Image (cartoon, rainbow, N blue to C red):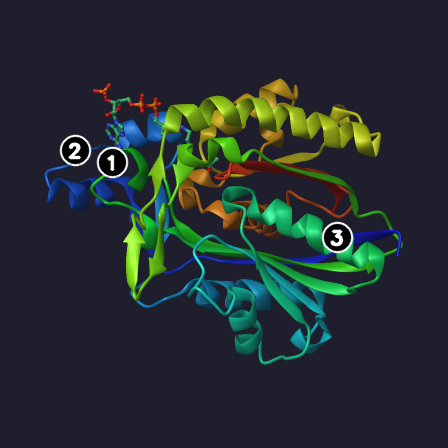
Amino acid sequence: PPSSRILGTGSYLPARRVTNQDLADQLARDGIETSDDWIVERTGIRARHFAADGETTSDLALPAARAALDAAGLTADEIDLIIVATSTPDMVFPSTACLLQQKLGIAGCAAFDVQAVCSGFVYALSVADAMIRTGAACKALVVGAETFSRILDFKDRTTCVLFGDGAGAVVLGASDAPGLHATELHADGRHADILCTPGTVAGGQVSGVPLLRMDGQAVFKLAVGVLEKVARSVLDKAGVPETDIDWLIPHQANIRIMQGTAKKLRLSLDKLIVTVDEHGNTSAASIPLALDVAVRDGRIQRGHKLMLEGVGGGFTWGAALLTY
Ligand code: ACO
């Protein structure tokens, strides 16, 4: 097939909504000071959702996947590929994609996880697109799902206020009509230490630090530059001028990074889809969550051109240009 296109989108947020004030009150009990004003001003975040105890990444992925299947008018057994982008898998193995497959009540199709932190969804979409173009798959379920609350250090106010839990999904199908025009992925492992969760399991115990660590300013400086460059490169590959972009759907980490990228691409800020205010940074889930919100509220219409772009730990980054 010449192309792959999005047949349906879905998303899911865990029930518990935690406002900045809720979080400030919780941190204050440990003698840590933060405020709604600080968080809103520096990040644009007002609230995030946290999974309940025992609620796993595949639990969040399941309703998002079902909603995407419904929107595509498909049943789960018509799916022949599942890719889950996550850095907070349910367990070391099997993959969250296999656990999701089981929860969907299907068996046999390929299922695997992609781990590229906040760029994970763009990575997963790009892999699914490539597999569809080669004929290795026909209808792919591509999910970004995270429970970052499990790896947050609630004694570190510089990171724990930034992240949330959630899941977003798309069904990507082979298509003769234009869908994904171009994608591009990058990584630079030299920056592994500026954003990491440096723990693992060994000898039956947790070794290292299984909590998120970040040098926020180093991340900020790298993020804006690489996002502009990769977006321009994808536009060039597709032969599409930046003025044709209807919606920019960046990874939702920080409103200042997102607005900075939109300005560099000379896009007006009303073309920017923003959910970071209500979701916080949900890592690999943020782009498909934002996409689904804007599809369901009617902003994104069939035929619109979307620029998706992610950046995150690794360091990884990438972009995808598509016609919805
Ligand atoms: N509440 C109150 N004060 C705080 C908090 C908090 N939650 N966190 C930090 N501060 C304080 C600091 O201690 C510091 O105080 P000091 O001046 O007395 O030392 C002051 O606020 C300023 O801290 P900075 O780190 O300089 O704040 P900055 O303006 O850089 O904002 C932030 C920090 C929001 C993390 C910013 O660097 C940023 O957005 N970085 C990008 C990283 C990001 O978005 N990462 C998301 C994951 S990566 C990704 O998804 C791509």
Q: Give amino acid for label 2.
A: Glu
Residue in front for this viewpoint, 95 or 160: 95
Question: Residue shown at 43%/64% (left/top)?
Answer: 92
Residue in front for this viewpoint, 203 or 32: 203
Q: Look at the image and tell me whether residue 259 can be seen.
A: no
- In the figure, residue 318 lies in which quadrant? top right
Camera-nearest label, 2 or 3: 3
The label shown at residue 33 is 2
Question: Residue shown at 79%/53% (left/top)?
Answer: 4
Work out how far the residue at label 1 is from the one at label 2, CA to CA, in angstroms.
8 Å
The residue tagged with tag 1: helix, strand or loop?
A: helix
| Residue position for label 1 | 157
Crowd band around label 1 with a 10 angstrom C-alpha radius: few (<14), some (14–19), many (20+): some
Q: Does residue 26 sit above or below 175 in this rendering?
A: above
Work out how far the residue at label 2 is from the one at label 3, CA to CA, in angstroms.
45 Å
| Residue position for label 3 | 129
Callouts 1 and 2 close, C-beta under 8 Å: yes
Residue in front for this viewpoint, 266 or 61: 61
The residue tagged with tag 3: helix, strand or loop?
A: helix
Q: Earlier in the sequence, mark 2 or mark 3?
A: 2
Question: Residue shown at 42%/24% (left/top)?
Answer: 218
Work out how far the residue at label 1 is from the one at label 3, CA to CA, in angstroms.
39 Å
Camera-nearest label, 1 or 2: 1
The answer as to whether callout 1 falls within 8 Å of ligand 1 is: yes
Q: Earlier in the sequence, mark 1 or mark 3?
A: 3
Quadrant in the picture for the N terminus: bottom right
